[in-house]
Amino acid sequence: MKKLAMIGCGGIGGYHLNHFLQFDDIELAGFCDIIPERAEDFVKKAGSGKAYTDFREMYDEVKPDMIFICVPPTEHGDIEFEAIKRGIPFFAEKPVALDLDLARRIRDEVEKAGLITAVGFQCRYSNLVGPNKQFINDKQIVFVDATRFGGVPGTPWFKVKSLSGGQIVEQTIHQYDIIRYVFDEPEMVFTLGARGFITEIEGYDTDDVSATVVKFRSGALAAISTGLYATSGDAFDSKIVFSARDARAELRILRDLKLYGYGDRPAEEDKKEEKEGFVIKNDGGFADSGSGEIVYKDEGKAGIMCDRTFIDAVLTGDGSRIRSPYADAVKSLEFTLACNKSMETGQPVMINFDK
């Protein structure tokens, strides 16, 4: 049985641990955190393994077959390089770094070692991705309008931009990444940010709101807006709209996908069960609202599928089904860091993924 170890036993680590507890073909062998009590708590929850505060000591003793790296953005680097040196496949949480040169060095060493890797862009594993890609393949997308608005997370380092990268890099990177995955690669970004609206949080030092214009290689444009100022769900509706000349797709990540002016509405005989307009059909869900709208519902399996796909890749030695290997995740990091650079300089920033 292959041994799995974790580095970082905070909130996102717990998210992954809950998935691991559903698997019976791996051994949860080691848990590392700079706060001993957190690592010990994970050992208790797992019912196996040993707690560590030094990841090298854990590597030496446990000799894991795979590791999950769930640390803050500034803590990447030595953990990955040591894993690469020892030939240990790894899964890293996003963002994979705040320094693009560091991420590229890790990427290059991974490639030299031929190592299986994955990054936590679980939204790529949603059942909404298939119909979203099909819509984009069938339609010429002219404009993308993406938004993500919420409040300030309680994690202490998040509110300091030098530690988190800001909302674009730490949170909204999911939106940037899924746009890349289902649509197109960016060519240029121009971003403006604003502060001064959030005054009630001590030690807060990041952007309250930002707006980015993107030009894609296809020639299409996007507007991506994100903010931390919201105190209520009534403040804004977060979604991604892919607009064609005669149709649109509205994606609410890990929630639903609505298609307008596209495809056939479900025939009456195809409806197996209907509740408040929701139709269950085959292995997916969609709703006929009476207005020509088709709605696909997220099945809630993306996170566990993301983890399971990496583990299966390590067990079989075949990483071809991993949807976000490390090298590709570096591109999403570059996309978001370009926005930060544009904010700092007040100038458009060209993106070159060939470096």
Image: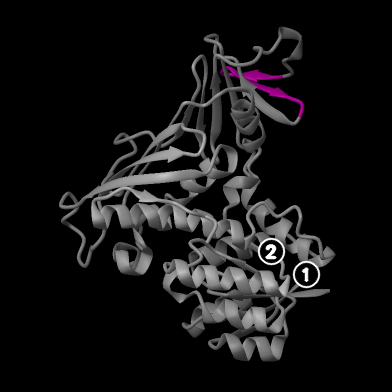
The N terminus - image quarter: bottom right
**Residue in view at x 55 percent, y 24 percent:** 140
Q: Amino acid at mark 2?
A: Phe
**How many other residues sit within 10 Å of disc 1, few (<14), some (14-19) or many (≥20)?**
some
User: Is 169 positioned to the left or the right of 3 in the image?
Assistant: left
- Residue 20 is tagged as 2
Answer few, some or many: residues within 10 Å of disc 2's Cα (few below 14, many 20 plus, some between 14 and 19).
many
Can residue 155 be seen by looking at this rendering? no
Kindly indicate the quadrant of the structure image that contains residue 59: bottom right
Residue nearest the viewer, comparing 19 with 293 = 293
Residue 313, how many percent across, how many down?
77, 61
Relative to 1, 184 lies left or right = left
Q: Residue at x 59, y 29 (%)?
A: 136
Q: Residue at x 63, y 33 (%)?
A: 133
**Residue receiving disc 1:** 26
On screen, residue 151 above or below 87 = above
Q: What element does badge 2 sit on?
A: helix
Q: Which residues are magenta?
A: 273-282
Count of marks, rendered view: 2
Amino acid type at circle 1 is Ile
Quote the CA–CA distance across marks 2 and 1: 8 Å
Q: Nearer the viewer, residue 196 or 339?
A: 339
The circle drawn on residue 326 is none
